[in-house]
Image (cartoon, rainbow, N blue to C red):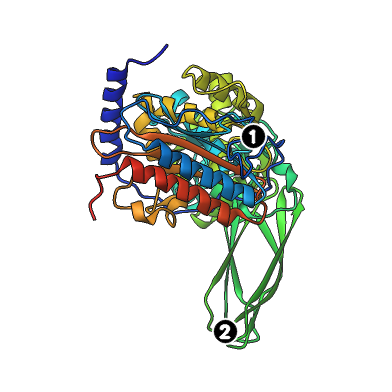
Amino acid sequence: MPRHPRRTASVVALLLSLILARPSGSQPLDGDAGLGDRSPRTAKPTQENPVAPSAPRPPLASRGPQKIDPDRARAHLEKLATDVRHLGGRVGVLALDVASGATLAAFDPRGLYNPASNAKLFTAAAALRLLGPSYRYLTGLYGEASNGAVAELVLRGSGDPSLRTRDLWEMARALQAAGVRKVAGIAIDQGYFDARYVPPAFDQQPEEWAAFRAPVAAASLNANSLLFTVRPSKAGQAASVAIDPPGFTVLEGAVTTARRGTPEKLGVRLVPNGGRLVAHLSGHIPEGGRAVSLARRVDDPRLVVAYALKEMLREVGVDVTGDVRLGGERQKRLLVAHRSEPLGELLSALGKDSDNFYAETIFKTLAAEKRGRPGTAEGAAEVVGEALRELDAFGEDVVLKNGSGLFDAARVSPEAIVRLLRAALLDPALGSDFVAQLAIGGVDGTLRGRFRGWSKERAIRAKTGTLASVAALSGYILPPPGRSPIAFAVLASDVPGKIDPARRAIDDFVESLADELWKDARTP
């Protein structure tokens, strides 16, 4: 059913006032990395015909309240298509006026592309719709306490992606403060998610130990990654090595302290050993030099938090006599609870920081909450599709296998992304929180170093996407008063080794739209 134009304009105006009033604050993380696009090619533009026959040029002149010059929009669009073609790739583009739905620019808008981390837009929108921005994760310690002793302490997770070492320390101290002095054993209930802790498509790079490929679990700690911090001592002596979180990793080998001025050289080789990891250390670090930190993912995440908790309990004065295991599903007596920050705040890790671990964990949470435990990636994909179809924001051509878009796991069209963007912004229950989790051009997240000329207006709010041969950017250009936002999606594919020039071409195009939208409204 078509939207009433006056009512739509009123909704847009209200949401814009809420969005522009919200502060931002997020540290950027590089979450966009992985394999390239393997999608089938569609017809490419030629020098004589910049718009390929398979993607006929639609009318570019705005039929809504925008004052976008159609000739300029066409020229900038053709330049983008030509630039990407010269890089050996292909590109799909759609930009429209949010209030009226009028097309402002389009090139192969229905072509299917690997969206890379633009897939996180679907995860974030579904999470806000199904769970709500105030949803909080619960991580609890359960057991029967008697005379200061717990026969078996159970840690149960519900998928909190934000649980950190400091949170687990607080839980250990709270248990000790409650009078517990002895624990016979520790069990970890991971039953909220299924046992497939490696997300779909992540097995395409099984030897990748970088933190961006961390596995997921219902009870996770530090995003299931290890931080090795190496500090020099005196020349000829072993350097000190600290591991966060503690308890899970067995150290072998050593890093030596070399003479001052010697270039540092560190090696960490991880080998799974049962439910734990063995870290083989090598190399050297110069005396008087800085501390060096290395982050690596774990292999099997299911017992990481158990070993860390065991170590922490001992540190705070609780005697743990037994070992750790998976289990404890039947224990219901809650002793200590930790709740995460609201989901509306956690989502900035997706939109601003492009954090794959958060995306995959929230993805599985949707399945567990709406289909029942254990949550699965397959169930999550179905739940996301069903939820967004209710908003008319999920086309039949959309394929999502995981929640992050990492590796070769998704196919979407620019049209599908823009449909989602428009529906989310026009939904009063979603719009403000959905836009708030996106990176702000020139200000924060993965766009901190891009669109710096627009940092004052804070007008460009978007989600980046980067794989070995994919560069993507989708989001909004927020307007000056009295005008309507633009929703856009640009997906460039088949540009291996040429991500930077493809990204510059995308940015030039988006900035050209912003210039048109803000024409005569920017102050020097």
Name the residue tied to disc 1: 410
Q: 393 or 335, which lies in front?
A: 393
For the view shown, which residue lies furthest in the top direction? Answer: 1
The quarter holding residue 151 reads: top right
Residue 251 percent location from the top left of the image? 69, 64
Residue 265 percent location from the top left of the image? 66, 75
The quarter holding residue 465 reads: top right
Q: Is residue 403 left or right of residue 522?
A: right
Q: 55 or 205, which lies in front?
A: 55
Instruction: Please say if 224 is above or below 158.
Output: below
Q: Are marks 2 and 1 in contact (CB under 8 Å)?
A: no
Q: Is residue 105 left or right of residue 410?
A: left
On residue 287, which mark appears? Answer: 2
Mark 2, Cα crowd under 10 Å, few <14 / some 14-19 / many 20+, is: many
Q: Is residue 79 visible?
A: yes
Residue 250 percent location from the top left of the image? 69, 60
